[in-house]
Structures are given as C-alpha cells and as structure tokens.
Amino acid sequence: MSVELDLKDYIRILRKRIWMILVIVIVCSSITAIVSMVWLQPIYQASTKLIVNKTDEALNASQLDINAVNLNIRLIDTYKEIIKTPAIMDKVVQEYPDLGLTSEQLTSQVKISSVNNTQVMTVSVQNSSFRKATEIVNAISVVFIRQIPTIMKVDNVSFLAPANPDKTPLQVKPQPVLNTAIAFIVSLMLAIGVALLIEYMDDTIRTEQDVDQYLGLPLIGLIPVQKEEDTKEKNKAAALGRGRESNVQAQS
C-alpha cells in the first residue's frame, strides 16, 4: 500500500533518529578536520604579473592606440596557451636544472589567468614549498618573456611584478574550515537520507496509528508490554500476599 508522508511525518522520523544523525555528522566532520589539519601537506602559491604592452607605448601613454591595446588584450589568450607548450617549458628545464622538474611537471603546476579587458597576465604556481614555488614561477616568466619575441615576432611582454620569495606565504591548500563545513553539509544530507531509508525499509507495526495507516483495519485489542521489573514486583507482592494468608489461617 502506497503511503504519502507529510511534513509532520518527516519531522517525526528525524526526531526519532536524531542521535544517529548527530553521530554521523560529528564523526564525519571531526575526521575531515583532523585529516585537513594533521595529515594533508600544506600547499602554497606564488605568482608573477606580466603586462602585455610595447615598451615605447608604455613610456608614452599619450600616444597609445586603442587598436593596439585591443590587440594586446586579444593576444593574452594566445599567450596563455603558448606558455604551457614545450617551446617554453623545455627551455625552463634546460636553463634551470636545479628545479628538478620535467616539462610535464611544470605544465601541470602552472596556472595562467587574466582579468577581462586588461593587459595583465597572472602566472601562478602551487608547491609544498613557497620558496620553490617562487623560483618556478619566476623562471617560467623569465623564459616566456625572452622567448615570445622569437615565437610571435613581437616584443610586447614585460614583468609587472615578479614573485617575492621573502613574502609571507599564504597557504591555499588544504583549508580546514572550508573542508569541515563541506563535510558537515554532506554528512548531514547523508545522515538524513539514511534515516529516511531505514524508516522506509522498516515495515514493523508497533502502534495503533501504524495499524490504521498501513492496514486500514480497526483495532480489536492490545497486548501490553510486560517489563521484567514489573513482573518481579508482582511476583513479590503475590508472595507476600500468600504469606499473610498463611499466617491468618495458622492463627485461626
């Protein structure tokens, strides 16, 4: 028989299994927080900023041509792809062997971004060592600036802000607070789902309401639950009663 649940039924089910829900949420959130703070290796990010603009145009802003600016902005999308190619990464590996990375490893670590309608590119690298991250991102930027005139036949990229290894590092991964918050939400949804599933799978009839709801039959009678303590008390009282009766009969 199909039974539709209303809001009161859902609230009743959740209240009935509130302790199971709390245990699941607390355990999952605690494990996530401990793993994030203790076991996961911290990751730091270093970045450089490059400006796409010809040197003579940068020195004489009054003579800037809007068409040239728009061309430089459109070139940024091309530069994002070029910087990740072997033409750049192989040169970085050759010129900076102390980094101890292959061109594939460099490509996987570097991230290129830009703000729309600007001539500024941001080159970022994440590593477990902040100083190593600054060395990698500076090396990639230097090689890119030097190689781009050969590749594109145009010299319009220069440093705007190199990565500073002495800067206070900012940890980007892991984020214990964010991870714990996500674990809390996911585990809460999971716990509620488990509670509803258990209730759906449980077809045991326990109350008068269950009989009426699931069977649609009138209730003829009830068999009360007899607790062990109540049974002991009744047996004790019966034994005392029989003892008093025996004493009365003996006296008579």
Image (cartoon, grey):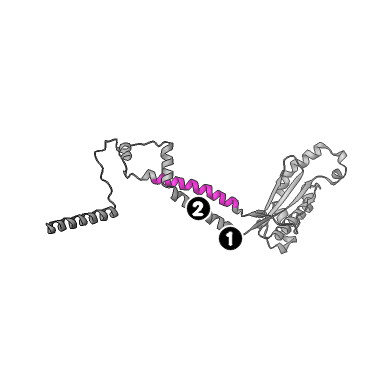
**What amino acid is labelled 2 in the image?**
Ile
- Element at label 1: helix
Determine whether 121 is above or below 99 in the image: above
Q: Main secondary structure of the magenta part?
A: helix
Type of residue at label 1?
Answer: Val
Query: Which label number is shown at residue 139?
Result: none
Depth check: give the residue in front, 40 or 16: 16
- Left or right: 166 with respect to 236? right
What residue occupies the far front of the structure in this picture? 252
Q: Is residue 142 left or right of residue 8?
A: right
Q: Identify the disc placed on residue 38.
A: 1
Q: Position of residue 221 (x, y in %)?
A: 24, 40
Q: Position of residue 211 (x, y in %)?
A: 30, 39
Work out whether mark 2 precedes mark 1 in sequence or the reverse, and give the earlier one.
2
Q: Which residue is mark 2?
A: 26
Task: Give how far apart the Cα atoms at labels 2 and 1 are.
Answer: 18 Å
Mark 1 surroundings within 10 Å by alpha-carbon count, few (fewer than 14), some (14 through 19), many (20 or more): few
Query: Quarter of the image holding residue 96?
Result: bottom right
Label 2: which secondary element: helix
What percent of the width, then of the height, locates residue 103?
68, 57
In the figure, is residue 184 to the left or right of 13? right
Q: Is residue 2 magenta?
A: no
**Which residue is drawn at the image coordinates 80% and 40% (left, top)?**
69
Percent across and percent down for residue 142 are 77, 55
Quadrant of the image for the N terminus?
top left
Is 152 placed left or right of 215 in the picture? right
185 within the magenta span:
yes
Observer-nearest of 53 and 250: 250
Q: Quadrant of residue 33?
A: bottom right
Residue range (magenta): 177-198
Classed neighbour count for the residue bearing mark 2: other residues with Cα under 10 Å, few (<14), some (14–19), many (≥20): some
